[in-house]
Image: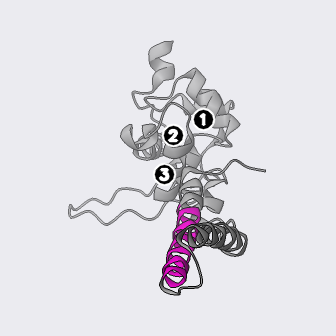
């Protein structure tokens, strides 16, 4: 069983609090009714209202305080970023039109390293350790990152332990698209941590 997220724990707490608050309201009304009628003494009314509070709260918890199914967003976040085709870039206002970034299948195999860890290190901000983490999370290389959409970047920002926000802060997608374009053109851009680390 997966541990509950912070949001799920907060919802559970709020439902529990609501159930007990409703039970307290019912017990207060019952106490007032017992005090107004002359059939109950004050002490009897207090004990009876306490009993009503406990029983009503327990019944409400059993009936209403169940785990809700996770929203679809959380279910999708459990999956690793998928290899997606980049959306076409908006047309520039200048006279020349840049070539669109190629798909992973169109990238020449000889231009990119065979090892996905070395390939990922071509992006600035990705060193050997981070590349290993990304490969373990299912990221296959620069061409895959070049095809990421906003939700893939958000997944990466949320799921990289100790590196929250790194993918968007270092703009991995733009870097990856530049690398893929340079690979298809046969040029070598200045670049990533692998070049700096030697």
Label 1: element kind: loop
Q: As drawn, which residue projects farthest toward the bottom?
A: 37
- Which numbered disc, 1 or 3, marks the residue closer to the eye? 3
Q: CA separation, marks 2 and 1?
A: 7 Å
Q: Which residues are magenta?
A: 14-35
- Residue 165 is situated, as x and y percent measured from the top left of the image, at 43, 40
Magenta segment, prevailing SS (helix, strand or loop)? helix
Report x, y in % for residue 39.
59, 84
Please name the residue that numbered disc 3 is placed on.
154
Q: Which mark is residue 183?
A: 2
Q: Please state which of residues 34 and 128 is positioned toward the viewer in this rendering.
A: 34
116 to the left or right of 154: right
Check whether the beta carbons of the residues at disc 2 and disc 1 lie within 8 A of each other: yes
Is residue 29 highlighted in magenta?
yes
User: Which of the numbered marks, if any, corresponds to residue 112?
Assistant: 1
Q: Secondary structure at mark 3?
A: helix
């Amino acid at each position: 069983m997966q541990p509950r997220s912070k949001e799920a724990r907060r919802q559970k707490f709020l439902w529990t609090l609501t159930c007990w608050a409703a039970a307290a309201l019912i017990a207060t009304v019952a106490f007032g009714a017992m005090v107004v009628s002359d059939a109950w003494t004050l002490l009897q009314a207090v004990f009876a209202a306490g009993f009503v509070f406990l029983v009503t709260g327990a019944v409400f918890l059993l009936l209403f305080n169940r785990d809700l199914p996770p929203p679809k967003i959380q279910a999708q976040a459990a999956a690793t970023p998928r290899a997606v085709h980049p959306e076409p870039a908006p047309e520039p206002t200048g006279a020349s039109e840049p070539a669109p970034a190629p798909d992973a299948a169109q990238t020449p195999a000889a231009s990119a390293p065979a090892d996905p860890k070395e390939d990922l290190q071509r992006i600035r901000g990705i060193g050997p350790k981070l590349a290993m983490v990304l490969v373990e999370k299912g990221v296959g290389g620069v061409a895959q990152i070049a095809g990421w959409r906003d939700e893939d970047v958000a997944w990466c920002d949320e799921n990289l332990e100790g590196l929250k926000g790194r993918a968007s802060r270092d703009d991995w997608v733009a870097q990856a698209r530049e690398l893929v374009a340079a690979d298809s053109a046969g040029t070598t851009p200045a670049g990533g941590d692998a070049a700096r680390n030697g």
